[in-house]
Amino acid sequence: MTAAVFIGCSFIAFGPALALCVCTIAAEPLRLLFLIAGGFFWLVSLLLSSLVWFIAVQIGGSNNASVKKNLLIFGVMVSVLLQEVFRFAYYKLLKKANKGLMTISQEETLPISVRQLSYVSGLGFGIMSGVFSLVNILTDSWGPGTVGIYGDSPQYFLSSAFMTLAIVLLHIFWGIVFFDACEKKKWWALALVILSHLLVSGVTFQNPQYEGSLVPSYIIMMLMATWAFFTAGGSLRNLKLCLMCRDKDFLLANQRPR
Amino acid sequence: MCLKRKDLFCVAIIGFHRAVPMTELSAHLPQFQHGQLTENFPDNHLSNTNDNSERRRHDNSERRRNDNPESETNGQPQNRAQQVVEQDEEDEELTLKYGAKHVIMLFAPVTLCMVVVVATIKSVSFYTRKDGQLIYTPFTEDTDTVGQRALNSILNAAIMISVIIVMTILLVVLYKYRCYKVIHGWLIISSLLLLFFFSFIYLGEVFKTYNVAMDYITLALMIWNFGVVGMICIHWKGPLRLQQAYLIMISALMALVFIKYLPEWTAWLILAVISVYDLVAVLCPKGPLRMLVETAQERNETLFPALIYSSTMIWLVNMAEEDPEAQRKASKSSTYDKQAAANQIQNEDADMDDGGFNPEWEQQRNSRIGPLESTPESRAAVQALPSNSQASEDPEERGVKLGLGDFIFYSVLVGKASATASGDWNTTLACFVAILIGLCLTLLLLAIFKKALPALPISITFGLVFYFATDNLVQPFMDQLAFHQFYI
């Protein structure tokens, strides 16, 4: 417990997101702004879904544990759907804002491309989601205690951290695929994103059997990662060049001939 | 020069005007920034420089002080009035390009202030302990019934707001009748109290929390140094970062005092009412703030000094170090002779110093614009001038300003959220994000409407909505999810 678990879990969950922020977002104020706005949109979706859940609980009104659990499952599903709705709303808002910016500034190109926006908004959603899921657990892990003393799993903190990491990364990939699908009107891709989100959330109902929840989540995350990679314009050739430090950006930055 | 309506950025006005009444409330507040003002004179050259940087910035003419000889630039802008129209289109583009940067330049200090407040609240228990109330909130909230508590908190809030209104009106009256010395004295006393007394208490409580043994002599030395450097930085001159750090620290100290001494319901009510008051005071024609600004406009002078956070560079220092390139623009040397006289900058070897203008260049210039002399006096005068160099045309360098009152109230909201919320960190984070987004929207509105707007209403509304919603709706939901380890 205490500091080791706290630091370990927080870096497991937020390390990649932090690294992404530092490397790609921190330098550009516009991206930082859109990141925070994305987080705000996720927050609003959470608010609405908690409202729905709260009303359902008040209506359902019994103290039965299984009824409560079912209502919670219902709440989770509603929340996932609302998150995707708000992702779409954010997409619409960004398009409008970009259009406005373009007409006013009379430039040929947008100040920030839709692909960058999809990445930034996905990251924003992911960070907010991860933070809200994990931060109270992390503060509990800072203090003394014994995990699982009542028969719960002793790997509670670690599994929470890994699950949060998966969610954060998944949000990024979902964002990229989602925006691309909206741009190119590929509604099947949109439906697939929503389905995979529902699937990942559904799989967590199997906790604390972590094999049943963590493994599928990570598999889905890998699949989404490759999908998002190819959607964003990556290819095996690009990847090879990048890894061999022979890609255009690297060469330009280092003034070396190919 | 005439000040246009779009010069007036109420966000700052609200800030200091918020801050000033509060000086009375907690008997220590705004300090004015003599030293700060010189750097902001670019803002006053609205006619010749980017209008948008003006729009974006929560600055207004009050920044300039009349008695500061180095920022006396009344002669200049009238020459550039014609350039306003052409500059407008470029300005639009620049606004948008650089708008995000300025928003982030405000996010950083606001975030820092909130982080300091939340960190203190979480670690130092002194600020969450009930140790009585301010005299401005005499009614206690430890009552038997909910109704009585509600009534008491409404009365407390009413008293507090009326004190603020009275203070603002007093300020407007003092300003109208030109009692500048009274205002300055008031500000200096309040900043003294804040920098010495409240930081002493803060330090003492931090030591108690971490069980650090400290003798009075070392403590006295530390507080003395902190306070004196603070007074110098804030009221006179100092490195920009240090000044910003001090402003953030005193905002945090003020916010902590409010969090400690305002009972719960009263605090929320006061936050709500003050945003409404802010809105009214800035936008209504007879609002005190608006009258203040209009008076300053009529008198063609800066408003009385106030506590405003600024992220601009210190222009005067830069100008003095610039190479002669900057001086080439000052071909209108005749207007500035009187300033040269007032100017302290002396060039040694005045005869030998040709200011870098070699004979060929001088010949060229003579053929183009007629014989003008670049004498050491004219160069010195130019060096003393604000903003006419290329660097000042670059909006990136211009920076933004926000009144410290806004800092204080944002931090009060977030601090109260972290102190009393059952949702704990979720609520704190939600309020934090809400306030940042509110600030962003306010800046956007500022850019769209190009008129004075208050900074408090949108952010505080969002903050309050998110506080109550997160605390009552989201927290039970997330709690249940964490219990079952479900993920959304």
Image (tube, rainbow, N blue to C red):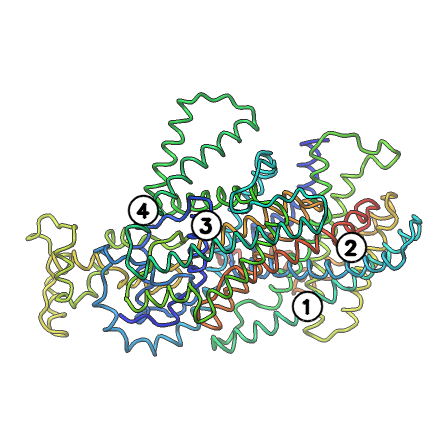
Q: Upstream in the sequence, badge 2 or badge 3? A: 3
Amino acid under disc 3: Met
- Whether callout 2 and callout 4 share a subunit is answered yes
- Helix, strand or loop at mark 2: loop
* Label 3, residues with CA under 10 Å away: few <14, some 14-19, many ≥20: many
Of the residues under marks 4 and 3, which one precedes in the sequence? 3
Distance from the alpha carbon under mark 2 to that under mark 1: 20 Å
Q: Amino acid at mark 4?
A: Gly
Task: Using the image, name the chain to which the residue with label 2 belongs.
Answer: B
Q: Residue tagged by mark 4?
A: B185
Q: Residue at x 47, y 64 (%)?
A: B281
Q: Would you call the spot at circle 1 few (<14 residues within 10 Å), some (14-19), or many (20 or more)?
A: many
Q: Spatial distance from mark 1 to mark 4, Cα to Cα? A: 58 Å
Q: Nearer the viewer, residue A77 or B308?
A: B308
Residue contact between numbered discs 4 and 3, judged by CB atoms under 8 Å:
no
Mark nearer the viewer, 2 or 1? 2
